Image (tube, helix red, strand yellow):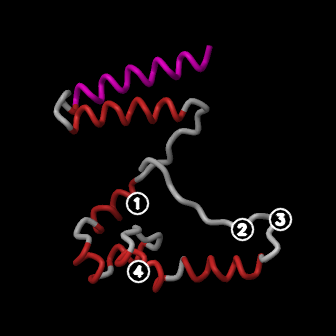
Amino acid sequence: MLGIWLLGIPATSKNKAEAFDFLLFVTSPEIQKVMALHVGNPPTLMSLYKDPELIARYRWYPAQLEALLAGVPRPRVPVWSRVEDILGGYMHEALIGLRTPEDAVRAAHEAIVAVLEEERR
């Protein structure tokens, strides 16, 4: 996954109770389902990836849940934006047929290693 959304309440908020109520509302199963059905936002609750109505609309949800459960957080490195640009560029080339997937992965690996080595110096 490239990028995520987070919700939170600023420490300086003048309306902390209302903000907390909103967070409870927007993360509730009912609203998560509405957002998935009518806005297309993937839910944040695992149970909704097994919901028959959502699966009927988004047949890939079971596979997406498996991927989420198998996911590994990205490395926290200062040059992540460069790594992401490299990876995205080579993925794009593979998707449009300019490179084989194997060649794209190999080239991305070499370019990323070079960026990380440059950062260490």
The local crowd at label 1, few if under 14, some if 14 to 19, many if 20 or more residues have their Cα within 10 Å, is few
Q: Which residue is mark 1?
A: 69
Cβ–Cβ under 8 Å for marks 4 and 1: no
Would you identify the image quadrant in which residue 38 lies?
bottom left
In the figure, is residue 35 to the left or right of 62? right
> In what quadrant of the picture does the C terminus appear?
top right
Three-letter code for the amino acid on which mark 1 is drawn:
Leu
In primary-sequence order, the first of circles 2 and 4 is: 2
Say which residue label 2 marks.
9
Comparing labels 3 and 4, the label whose residue is closer to the camera: 3
Secondary structure mostly seen in the magenta stretch: helix
Residue nearer the viewer, 72 or 23: 23
Q: Are marks 2 and 4 in contact (CB under 8 Å)?
A: no
Residue drawn at point x = 19 percent, y = 36 percent? 96
Label 2 vs label 1: CA separation? 27 Å
Residue 2 x %, y %: 44, 47
Q: Which residue is mark 4?
A: 33
Residue 12: assigned label: 3
User: What residue is drawn where x is 42% and y is 50%?
Assistant: 1
